[in-house]
Amino acid sequence: MAAAKKTRFLSFFKEIFQELKKVVWPTREQLVKNTVTVVTVCIIIGLIIWMFDWGLSSLVNLLLK
């Protein structure tokens, strides 16, 4: 029983390394470009959410006064 588990365990990691060899890793330029894009989009979406929050908060304050 233990030998079968050990074989499955080793087979699992062997398959992982085989799959990692198939991965096409991005170049440094692609990585930087994609990172800048993600950070920019996050900032833009954050600003949009902040503007909606500020606008709705202002509207609620006007209605409650």
Image: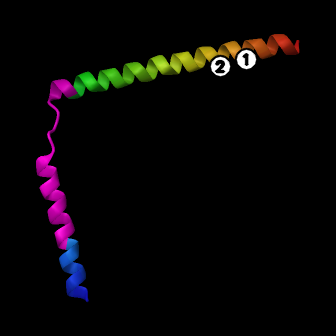
The amino acid type of the residue labelled 1 equals Ser
Residue 54, magenta (yes or no): no
Where does label 1 land, which residue? 57
Q: Residue furthest right?
A: 65
Q: Is residue 62 above or below residue 25?
A: above
Mark 2 crowdedness (10 Å alpha carbons): few <14, some 14-19, many ≥20: few
Dot 1: what SS? helix
Q: What type is the residue that disc 2 sits on? A: Asp
* Residues at marks 2 and 1, CA–CA distance in whole angstroms: 6 Å
Task: Tell me which corner region of the image, top left, top right, bottom left or bottom right, holds residue 48.
Answer: top right
Quarter of the image where one finds residue 63: top right
- Label 1 environment density (alpha carbons within 10 Å; few <14, some 14–19, many ≥20): few
Q: Tell me if residue 1 comes above or below residue 12 in the rendering.
A: below
- Residue 37, position as x, y percentages in the image: 33, 21
Q: In percent of the image, x 21 and y 79: which residue is there?
A: 6
Residue at 12%, 48% in the rendered image: 22
Q: Which range is magenta?
A: 10-30
Residue 7 appears at what percent x and percent y? 18, 78
Residue drawn at point x = 82 percent, y = 10 percent: 62
Quadrant location of the N terminus in the rendered image: bottom left
Which residue appears at 52% of the width and 16% of the height? 47
What residue does disc 2 label? 53
Q: Are marks 2 and 1 in contact (CB under 8 Å)?
A: yes
